Image (tube, rainbow, N blue to C red):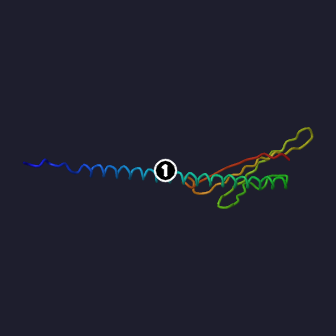
């Protein structure tokens, strides 16, 4: 009597398939985690850039208010790793015998190299009447 042939190797194929699928899922999870961390860091940098631009605008408003004219434009300020550029334009109008000066101030804060993942820029503007 001959013994029936035993089939072998199916468990090895299933194990290899399972290892490949689990490795692919692990790589996907690492990729998603990395993307979320980069996105979170960019959100924080964006808020920091916004507040740096806001600080530059407040400085420009205070300088324009004190001198009753635009500060030297553009003015570049370095603030906590951000380059803040403050610009001001003014127009003088006469209305009913009264002279009115309208000033338009804008502030742009940026950091990092343009085109890179770390680049961030925010801008704010305001109008002032004297």
Looking at this view, name the residue that lies furthest to the front: 1
Residue found at the very far top of the displayed protein: 96
Question: Seen in the image, is 103 located left or right of residue 45?
Answer: right
Residue 129: image location, x then y, percent: 83, 45
Q: In the image, 75: left or right of 20? A: right
Secondary structure of the residue carrying numbered label 1: helix
* Depth check, front residue: 34 or 8: 8
Pick the front one: 75 or 45: 45
Q: Where is residue 53 in the image (x, y as percent from the top left)?
A: 70, 53
Image position of 80 (left or right of 23): right
Pointer 1: residues within 10 angstroms few (<14), some, or many (20+)?
Answer: few
Marker count (numbered): 1
Check disc 1 and report the residue beneath it: 32
Place of residue 111 in the rendered image (x, y in percent of width and height, measured from the top left): 62, 57
- In the image, what residue occupies the spot 39% across and 50% down? 24
Question: Residue most toward the left?
Answer: 1
Q: Residue furthest right?
A: 97
Left or right of residue 66, residue 40 in this image: left
> Where residue 16 appears, x then y in whole percent?
30, 52
């Amino acid at each position: 009597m001959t013994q029936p042939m035993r089939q072998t190797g199916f468990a090895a194929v299933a194990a290899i398939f399972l290892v490949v699928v689990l490795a692919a899922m692990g790589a996907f999870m690492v990729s998603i985690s990395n993307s979320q961390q980069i996105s979170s860091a960019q959100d924080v940098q964006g808020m920091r850039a916004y507040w740096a631009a806001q600080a530059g605008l407040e400085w420009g408003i205070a300088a324009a208010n004190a001198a009753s004219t635009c500060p030297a434009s553009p003015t570049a300020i370095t603030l906590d790793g951000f380059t803040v550029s403050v610009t001001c334009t003014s127009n003088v109008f006469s209305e009913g015998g009264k002279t009115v000066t309208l000033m338009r101030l804008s502030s742009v804060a940026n950091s990092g190299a343009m085109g890179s993942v770390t680049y961030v820029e925010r801008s704010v503007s305001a109008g002032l009447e004297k």
